[in-house]
Image (cartoon, rainbow, N blue to C red):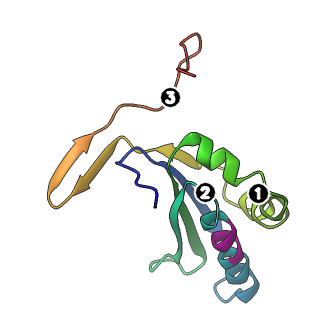
Amino acid sequence: MIVCLGRCVLLVCRFAVPAADDAFVARLRRALELLTAAPGCLGGEAGRSVEDPDRWLLTVRFASVDAYRRALRPFPVREHVVPLLADALADEPATFETLVTAKAGHAEELPTLRVEPGEPTGR
């Protein structure tokens, strides 16, 4: 079991799809099966907007940037997931880091995972 400790990488993709598209739901399901089987993947969900049934959301949590990148490498992921991600709305970023986490009424700020150009990576 991998524990995130709040410092997760979040993949958040939005889609505009006709309301009753069973093939799209099958693609989402397959993407979640493949991504959540990857080491370092903490889970994922897909859902449809209650206000606009043509809008869908895919979210997947990873323990680190490296886990996210490694999850995209296997051939089945490149064959099934990458084309799905290419269909996502591209008007804003899709990968985020967790900077504030909350549980049981307590919120905690976390340091960034980003490394600015010129900074050592610690590796």
Q: Earlier in the sequence, mark 1 or mark 3?
A: 1
Left or right: 59, with 17 as reference point: left
Magenta span of residues: 30-34
Which of label 1 and label 3 is nearer to you?
Answer: 3
Residue at left offset 53%, top offset 78%:
48
Asked if the stretch drawn in magenta spans residue 43, the answer is: no
- Element carrying mark 2: loop
Asked if the stretch drawn in magenta spans residue 32, the answer is: yes
Residue at left offset 65%, top offset 73%:
33
Residue at left offset 57%, top offset 47%:
95
Return the residue at label 1: 86
Query: Where residue 63 appears, x then y in whole percent?
Result: 49, 49
Q: How many neighbours does mark 1 have within 10 angstroms: few (below 14), some (14-19), or many (20 or more)? A: few
Left or right: 79, with 111 as reference point: right
Residue 90 visible somewhere in the drawing: yes
Return the residue at label 3: 114
Mark number for residue 39?
Answer: 2
Nearer the observer, 41 or 97: 41
Answer whether labels 1 and 3 touch (C-beta < 8 Å).
no
Q: Amino acid at mark 1?
A: Ala
